[in-house]
Amino acid sequence: MQASHGAYSLTDDPDAIDLDVVCDLLRDTYWAADRPRDLVALSLRNSLCFSVRHHDRQVALARVLTDHGAVSYLCDVVVDPAHRGRRVGRWLMQCVLEHPAVRQTRTLLVTRDAQRFYAELGFVTHPYECMVRAEPLRRDGVV
């Protein structure tokens, strides 16, 4: 998938991901600030990723786990603070939700603070209780 929006371009090509930039963007989030670089790289390799570039620099990412038919899980949606307020995140999400691997699936996400943003894109609070297995020990033995 390729798309453009003014000076921004979007692709789902895994070779377009700038791992250094993604690690920097995730370091400033509440959900992945401590995620080690090797686990970021592993998660990217095993996901459908959407990279947004402004000219030659990556400025946003969204990652999706999907079975292409029933369920998708949207995660690691992050936009460089210098590019927020320019509707880059909204455009990114519209592209993600229209992607053939996501379009026909029930798309889940977890957010602590962006409910209003996602509600404007059609997301609703799920009526059932969400459960999560505690994060297992990392390979280095650190929780």
Image (cartoon, grey):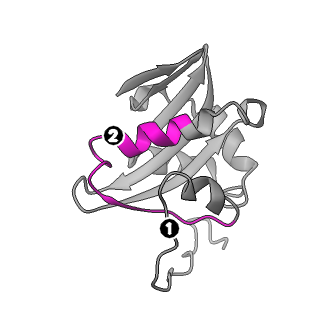
Q: Which residue is mark 1?
A: 124
The amino acid sitting under disc 1 is: Val
- The answer to whether residue 53 is above or below residue 20 is above
- Categorize mark 1 by other alpha carbons within 10 Å: few (<14), some (14-19), many (20+): few
Q: Which residues are magenta?
A: 91-112
The amino acid sitting under disc 2 is: His
Task: Describe residue 53's horizontal placement relative to residue 106 as left or right.
Answer: right
Residue nearest the viewer, comparing 45 with 95: 95
Q: Residue at x 57, y 16 (%)?
A: 6
- The answer to whether residue 59 is above or below residue 141 is above
x, y percent for residue 44: 46, 45
Q: Residue at x 26, y 57 (%)?
A: 67
Tell me the tag on residue 99: 2
**Residue 104 covered by magenta stretch:** yes
x, y percent for residue 118: 56, 56
- The answer to whether residue 136 is above or below residue 58 is below
Looking at the rendering, in which quadrant would you find the N terminus?
top left
Label 1 – label 2 distance at C-alpha: 20 Å
Q: Residue at x 68, y 67 (%)?
A: 112
Badge 1 or badge 2: first in the primary sequence: 2
